[in-house]
Image: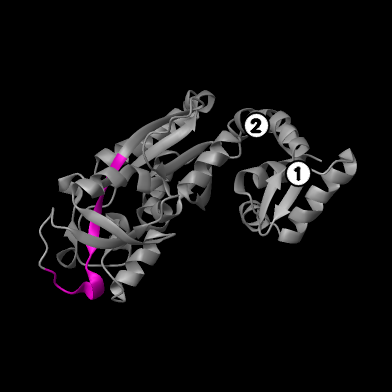
Amino acid sequence: MIKNLETLVQLAQTGTMKETATRMNISQGAVSKRIAAIENYYGRQIIERHGRRVVLTQHGRKLVDRTMPLLQEVRSVFLEDTALQSGRIIVGVSESILGSWGSRLFAAVREDMPEVNFEFHAQRSPVVLDRLRSGELMVGICTGSADAESDLQSDIVYLEPMVIVPTGLKHIAYRIGDPLQVMTIESRSGAWAAMEDDMRRLNLKRATSLESFFSVAQMALADFGHGLIPLGVANALSISSNKTIDLGSSGLNRPVRFVARKSMYSRSLIQSFYDSILDHAQEGGLPQRA
């Protein structure tokens, strides 16, 4: 029954069977069966379908409200009392970080902490935060502005410069502050909220948005428009620095944050992990201009 209730909680957060299935790494059919099992058990309708969207009924919402704290507590007990005692750290990482410079950073951290078993999950930053709150992850390395929720503690470990990839890598007569339309990440990402004000200050207007920075970069390389991406993504794709426009010195950066629940943050193993990441960040272990 716990798996069924976890599925209901995920469905309440995502609003679609497809997204729930993706997050839980199961089929949409399995999601439907788990929800049906809850409805059969309680003899109540807990969801209503509106096209592809799913809305919880009053009974469904009440069940989620009462179930969520219990599930969070169960996961928290497992993580703090089982995973930590066995020297295991479960880390959620923003996809664009792990896909660019994150793997090298974590390799350096592993050398500092050879006794620790690391488990990494690459997901979008909002998903990382949700899974931290639900007790599925112990630590998050993600992007965005400081989180307002009182149950999470967050520290910025790196300000990653943003760069413009000119369309087709063609030369453009551009000075920082000139109006320019760019492709960049979509609004639901963690990075967008942190960049929006600075983009406005620099007269950059988002003309097109995509779900990943790597997709933005590839579309810019294919001459579909100028792309605004993190420096690490440009380096990962071997885009030469003399072909891009660096905006980091002008204040357009994406904050990279170390995030955890407050109870987890205080644990000595997590503190050692944080210290190692910060040391390597200060030593220049994070992306520099190629």
Residue topped by disc 2: 72
Front residue of 259/162: it is 162
Disc 2 + disc 1, Cβ < 8 Å: no
Residue at 41% x, 49% y is: 107
16 on left or right of 244: right
Q: Is residue 236 above or below residue 265?
A: below
| Residue 252 in sight here | no
Front residue of 243/126: it is 126
Image-quadrant location for residue 100: bottom left
Decide: few, some or many residues near mark 2? Use Cα within 10 Å; few <14, some 14-19, many ≥20. Answer: some
Q: Amino acid at mark 2?
A: Gln
User: Could you tell me which secondary element the residue under label 2 belongs to?
Assistant: helix
Residue 166 lies within the magenta run: yes
Q: Amino acid at mark 1?
A: Lys
Q: Which residues are magenta?
A: 158-172
Q: Position of residue 150 (x, y in %)?
A: 48, 25
User: Could you tell me which secondary element the residue under label 1 belongs to?
Assistant: helix
Farthest residue, direction front: 50
Q: Earlier in the sequence, mark 2 or mark 1?
A: 1
